[in-house]
Image (tube, coloured by chain):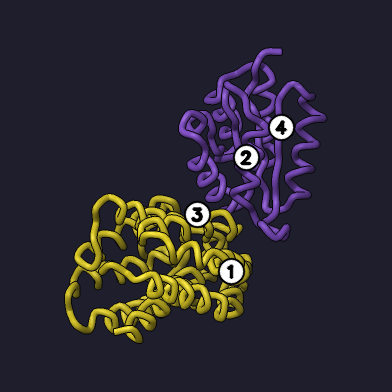
Chain colours: A purple, B yellow
Amino acid sequence: MNDTVGIVIVSHSKDIAKGTADMVRQMVGSEVRVAFCGGNPDGQLGTNVALIIDAINDAWSPKGVAVLVDLGGAETNSEMAVEMLPPDRRDLVVVCNAPIVEGAVMAATEAAGGSSLEQVRAVAEELSAG
Amino acid sequence: MSLQPDTLKSLVRAAAEQVIANAAELTALDQAIGDGDHGANMKRGFEAVLGKLDAIGAQSLDEALKTIGKTLVMTVGGASGPLYGSFFMAAGDALGRSKKLPDDLAEVFGSGVGAVSARGRSQPGEKTMLDVLVPVLETLKAEAGRPDLIERVRSTASEAVARTVPMQATKGRASYLGARSIGHVDPGARSSCVLLHAVCNTLEARQ
């Protein structure tokens, strides 16, 4: 199997993150690595830097990882998680400015075709360009 | 200022205890214009800091600040974790790079403020914690060395919190409310004030 960009889904709600990952897997299949996380360190609504780092490592691909987030704190915590990765991984992870469900599906579809991280990000972010 | 370990510990303890004591108020402020978790998030983060108090007290000040920052990043669970975490980690970094207290206090504090601004891609006037941190930084720069510096920092922080009331939020969850964010104290500004007051009160009591 050729390497494809990995996808990470970060929501305040673990249910939304898991549901989004389920949709990606059903629509795109298993050739793209998808990881998800949601909930704060107490398991309530929120996000958790440690879980985001784990998810990025789970979805890791030499071609990089695209992260899809929902609301503000998920974005800030994801950016923090990226900065806490080892230096050789940091530049291979992007946090996409895209709606979480549509962005994850579009990014995974693009990734499945073997596209680069920048191409995957661009396709996801087209959704926000309106 | 080479902080004695017991001074460092009492500063951290006071800051954490004040955040925890004010958690309900912070949550109430956040329920008005945010998602209502600021108090609970800050409480969880500073409880984790309290749990590491002995280890923090045994560290040099720059390492202690970095430990506090990293602990907040990993435990707060909302955007305030990376924001406050970045403040403490950047301040610790600045101290580690040969900055000295008290001479470089404004510079060290400024490094933290700069990190918050970069992390939140935010500027003063957007109804955030920066609306307290930046005025306090200005006071530290302008009033350095004055005998009443602590009192001036405390009053700057209180006045700055009050000035967030008429502001309209353009960053964070509160920005979704548009003009409806006007008329409320910003929760992040308030938590910054709580922390600064705790530090001021502790330092003053030890003078």
Foreground of the two, B177 or B32: B32
Residue at image mark 1: B47
Is label 3 on the same chain as label 2? no
The amino acid on which the numbered mark 3 sits, given as a three-letter code, is Lys
Q: Quadrant of the N terminus of chain B?
A: bottom left
Residue at image mark 3: B70
Mark 3 vs mark 2, CA separation in Å: 23 Å
The residue at 39%/50% (across/down) is B118
Is label 3 on the same chain as label 4? no
Q: Quadrant of the C terminus of chain B?
A: bottom left
The amino acid on which the numbered mark 1 sits, given as a three-letter code, is Glu
The amino acid on which the numbered mark 2 sits, given as a three-letter code, is Leu
**Viewer-nearest of discs 4 and 1:** 1
> Residue B21: x percent and y percent?
56, 81
Residue at the right extreme, as displayed = A26
Residue at image mark 4: A34
The residue at 77%/43% (across/down) is A18
Residue A68 numbered mark, or none: 2
- Upstream in sequence: badge 3 or badge 1: 1
Residue A40, located in which quarter of the rendered image? bottom right
